[in-house]
Amino acid sequence: MILTHAARLALATLALLVSAAYASWQSAPEAGESAPPLQRGPFVMNRGPDRLAVRFPRDEELQYSVSIALGVLGTPTVGKVTMSSKVEPFTPTDAPLLEGAQPTLEQVLVSAVAEGSYAVYSVKEVIATRVLPQLFPRLEHTTTQTGSENRRRELLIGRRDDAPISTYRSDGHCKGCKERKHFVESTWPWKDAAHCDGCKRGEHRDWRDPRTKEIPEGVLDMVSAVMLARTMVEQGRSEVQFTLLDREKLWEVELKRGRRGRRKVSAGEYDVVEVLLGARAGVAAGDDSKGQGEKKEEFVGLFGMHGSISIWMHPESGVPVAITGLVPAGPVTLDVVVELIRARGAPESFRAVVKPPAKR
Ligand SMILES: [Zn+2]
Ligand SMILES: [Zn+2]
């Protein structure tokens, strides 16, 4: 009884949506007519009713320096992070388009590239998310680490059979196969090359089997979560809650606008607002095994930042100006400072209060 009622309601909603789409199509200007050029705003990712839609700049690049605060020893720069957001056309792969049809579908690629080195250890990490105009994957989140260590991870978020799901896979060193590229020369000249039994070479690593699971509605990955935080600030919202999926772990995250102030970074001096982040472990849909005896984990953000992370954003545009936080590095915990060096393609409203002195 309840089921048929729900089905009827769903059908009615669907009919409404279809007629609304039809109406907007009807009123669209004829092709060829001199319609005024569209002032294209940001790429908008809708997340359903009651959830703040996430906005992405069409072509933006933000560069940051990463330094470690060492107190009296100063704040040496150890690396840089480049964050970019770019809208690209999206052509569905297996559905041929009608002749003369305008492929207006779009996708957005947001990536954060971190490069750094410390002593003999070097790292390049690319964390990227693609927002695609399809049910699955809707979000394609990848992490690729190269340098002294090599690692790849992939998280796909979307809907299948009308249920929100995620698929996660990571790579690992091959345990033994016939691939010659996995073989290494023996240190003894009379012995044949044999399959490597463990190293950090990227080309010796293979994808492990993906794992699929059901997730709650409206889940975001780490990168789209950053864009949601920006949107919250830009849209003048005081707070936003959402579920974050990091690898296979769900977190209930709450973002709030904090104190306002000024911050001087290499790119200039900016008005800023602090974004306060609160996170507690979430429970997966249909998972009732968790919660008991599980040790309390600490939330770890982008690039392994954890503990008291402070995010400072420009209040009108949401552009991150500075991020400070703690990053564990072996036996020590580093006090990391990430500061904006330069910005290109940022929203119009992003303006410095005081510009940096002109370079000579
Ligand atoms: Zn192998
Ligand atoms: Zn190997």
Image (cartoon, rainbow, N blue to C red):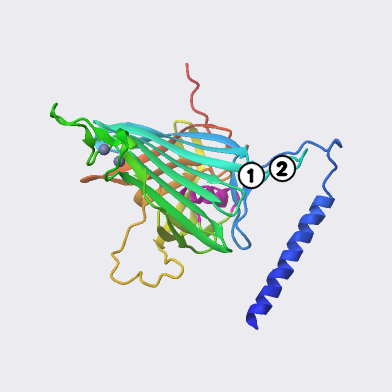
Q: Quadrant of ligand 1?
A: top left
Residue 21 appears in the figure: yes
Residue sitting at x 56%, y 59%? 159
What mark, if any, has residue 97 been given in the picture? Answer: 2
Residue sitting at x 66%, y 75%? 6
Marks 2,1: beta carbons within 8 A: yes
Residue 352 appears in the figure: no
Instruction: Say which of 244 and 12 sits in front.
Output: 12
Which SS class for mark 2?
A: loop
Question: Is 155 left or right of 163, judged from the image as shown?
Answer: left
Q: Tag 2: Cα neighbours inside 10 Å, few (<14), some, or many (≥20)?
A: few
Q: Residue furthest top?
A: 360
The spot of residue 237 in percent (x, y) is 58, 55
Instruction: Say which of 357 and 193 sits in front.
Output: 193
Question: Is 81 left or right of 7, judged from the image as shown?
Answer: left
The spot of residue 106 in percent (x, y) is 64, 42
Is residue 221 one of those drawn in magenta?
Answer: yes
Quarter of the image with the N terminus is: bottom right
Instruction: Say which of 351 and 255 sits in front.
Output: 255
Q: Looking at numbered disc 1 in the image, what kind of residue is underneath it?
A: Pro
Residue sitting at x 64%, y 44%? 92
Closer to the chain start, of discs 2 and 1, is 1
Residue bearing the label numbered 1: 92
What mark, if any, has residue 248 been given in the picture? Answer: none
Task: Estimate the spatial distance between the alpha carbons at disc 2 and disc 1, rounded to whole Å.
Answer: 9 Å
Report the span colored magenta: 220-236
Q: Looking at numbered disc 2 in the image, what kind of residue is underneath it?
A: Leu
The spot of residue 266 in percent (x, y) is 44, 31
